[in-house]
Amino acid sequence: MLIEPPKAGDPRTALDGIGLLEDGEIDIADAALQLARVDAPDEDWQAAREHLSEMARDAARLAFDVAADDLSAQAAALAGLVGGKYQYEGDRETYDDPANANLLRVIARRRGLPVALGIVWIHAARAGGWPVHGLDFPGHFVIGLEGGSEKLVLDVFAGGMPLDARALRKLVKRVQGPEAELKPALLARVSNRAVLLRLQNNVKLRRLEADDLAGALACTEDMLRIAPAAAAQWREAALMNQRLDRVSAALRCYDRFLGLVPEGEVASRARLAADELRSRLN
């Protein structure tokens, strides 16, 4: 087995359980807490969980005074709660600090990356009974409140500022370059798992930038605990194991990837890489 069974009380036990859930059954904030516990074992995660519960109770009370179809009022209520009462905001000064992608430390500091803050906002919005999703916007995570056929896009890094088409077009050009254009696919809903993987991808990339390949692999393995059908992560795990000369582990990862993606150019390259590794074992 690629990933060793967790010890009793290890947060990875919870991650394995999350991997068995249907996406809609995932408590996104609690899942992010379990991921955070792996890298911050000394933080008081039970206190953080109670903080999120208190926020949820506040959001539920707020919902009584906000019309179910008034997205602007919902956004204002959330901004007053998350950014006002609880004082969460984007960390512009130390953006690349790894703490900004760890929900336990985000809660302690009230600062974070867009996707970490987005998880807090999604948690609060859902507690209020308001339909909300992360959106597949590149480079800068945003969320969408929905009501009927309407959608209101919010920039949680900027305190929940609503983004109209002009602002979104400006933002996509900022993150993708002047030739980029705003397309409907960039505002498509993403799953709970996709949001959590996007959060952890920040951790993985920072470890790779620091030449901590083993740490990046450990992060990838935790991503696979919650998303065992994430084919791209299996391929990345295979490549990392290969670079670390962990041949048997790399082969197991390639086999899992090919079980999910048996055809196509990427599958052909993976099969060739696996065959080359097997020849080294003979």
Image: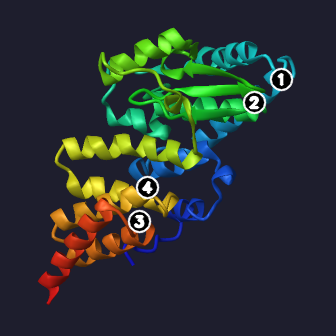
| Dot 2 alpha-carbon crowd within 10 angstroms: few under 14, some 14 to 19, many 20 or more | many
In this rendering, is residue 133 above or below 61? Answer: below
Q: Is residue 252 left or right of residue 36?
A: left
Which numbered disc, 3 or 1, marks the residue that appears first in the sequence? 1
Q: Is residue 22 visible?
A: yes
Which numbered disc covers residue 130? Answer: 2
Disc 4 or disc 1, which is closer to the eye? 1
Contact flag, marks 1 and 2 (Cβ < 8 Å)? yes
| Dot 3 alpha-carbon crowd within 10 angstroms: few under 14, some 14 to 19, many 20 or more | some
Q: Is residue 210 left or right of residue 95?
A: left
Residue type (three-letter) at the residue carrying disc 2: Trp
Q: Residue at x 61, y 29 (%)?
A: 121
Q: Give the residue pinned by disc 4.
A: 223
In this rendering, is residue 216 above or below 201? Answer: below
Instruction: Identify the colour scheme used.
Output: rainbow
3D distance between C-alphas at marks 3 and 1: 42 Å
Q: Residue extending furthest right?
A: 64
3D distance between C-alphas at marks 3 and 2: 36 Å
Which numbered disc covers residue 68? Answer: 1
Count of marks overlaid on the render: 4
Q: Residue extending furthest bottom?
A: 282
Q: Nearer the viewer, residue 277 or 225?
A: 277
**Image location of residue 43, percent across then percent down:** 47, 44
Residue type (three-letter) at the residue carrying disc 1: Ala
Q: Residue at x 41, y 45 (%)?
A: 200
Q: Give the residue pinned by disc 3.
A: 261
Q: Residue extending furthest front?
A: 264
Which numbered disc, 3 or 2, marks the residue that appears first in the sequence? 2
In this rendering, is residue 97 above or below 75? Answer: below
Instruction: For mark 1, give the secondary structure.
Output: loop
